[in-house]
Image (tube, helix red, strand yellow):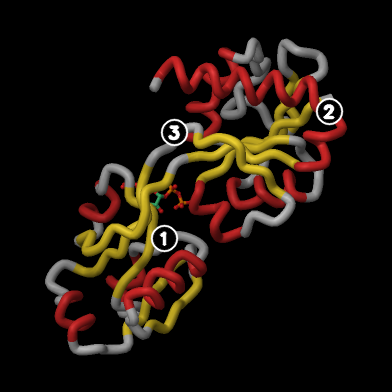
Amino acid sequence: MITLALSKGRIFDETLPLLQAAGIEVLDDPEKTRKLILATNQPDVRVVLVRATDVPTYVQYGGADLGITGLDTLIEHGNEGLYQPLDLRIAKCRVSVAVREGYDYAAAVRQGARLRVATKYVAIARDFFAAKGVHVDLIKLYGSMELAPLTGLADAIVDLVSTGNTLKANQLVEVERIMDISSRLVVNQAALKLKREPMRQIIDAFGKALEATA
Ligand code: PRP
């Protein structure tokens, strides 16, 4: 049995065409079922639905053989025990610094002010500001980062930006782009050895589907 860990939503939806290219069709709609293990048209391939941040954990410890997860999540989790063979170029977005409209971020940085930064992406934010030589106090949040500058919790946030609509709706502006994000296929190293043939088939089919759209 090959187990693929996916999260519901954008990653799941954008993975379906890749699965199709590998001849795999998921038999349930995750938005309609309460099931967490979804069968496919291939009796020896199944999909498990996990939280996006849990995908690397499932693959690292062998709860899943393969998984698809954002580069942001991977960086925060670390690469240990994971083989990362493919950039799937799906679920594209970026990690950026944003502040309240009217907040002079450039001046604060120039003056060497100590910035309070709220984020779910603590590792990415820490590395980014350290490389810039900016002193920051990081405040870990688990969601609704946009609220932090509006309530005075923080001067800035580090968050994912896709269309920019969420920032705009909350009177925030993007002031620095930290990195581009896309989803990656991650593979359990032991599973790749033990189930080499079926795993290779899936990885190669994904690779071919990507070449076709390049
Ligand atoms: C992300 C991010 C922003 C939003 C940005 O949240 O945290 O809130 O998307 O997208 P936009 O630029 O297109 O408006 P996501 O929906 O991934 O869920 P989350 O809040 O659980 O991170």
Q: Position of residue 181 (x, y in %)?
A: 42, 46
Please give left or right for residue 97 compared with residue 33 in the image: left
Camera-side residue: 4 or 208? 208
| Residue at mark 2 | 195
Q: Earlier in the sequence, mark 3 or mark 1?
A: 3
Q: Nearer the viewer, mark 1 or mark 2?
A: 2
Q: Residue at horizontal 76%, vertical 31%?
A: 3
Distance, label 3 to label 1, CA atoms, is 26 Å
| 85 lies above or below 205 | below
- The answer, for residue 9, to whether it is visible in the render is no
| 163 lies above or below 28 | below
| 208 lies above or below 119 | above
| Residue at mark 1 | 144
Residue type at mark 1: give it.
Ser
Residue type at mark 2: give it.
Lys
Distance, label 2 to label 3, CA atoms, is 25 Å
Q: Earlier in the sequence, mark 2 or mark 3?
A: 3
Q: Residue at horizontal 31%, vertical 72%?
A: 156
| Residue at mark 3 | 89
Where's the C terminus, which quadrant?
top left
Residue situated furthest right in the rendering? 194
Distance, label 1 to label 2, CA atoms, is 41 Å
Is the Cβ of the residue at disc 3 closer than 8 Å to that at disc 1?
no
Camera-side residue: 178 or 33? 178
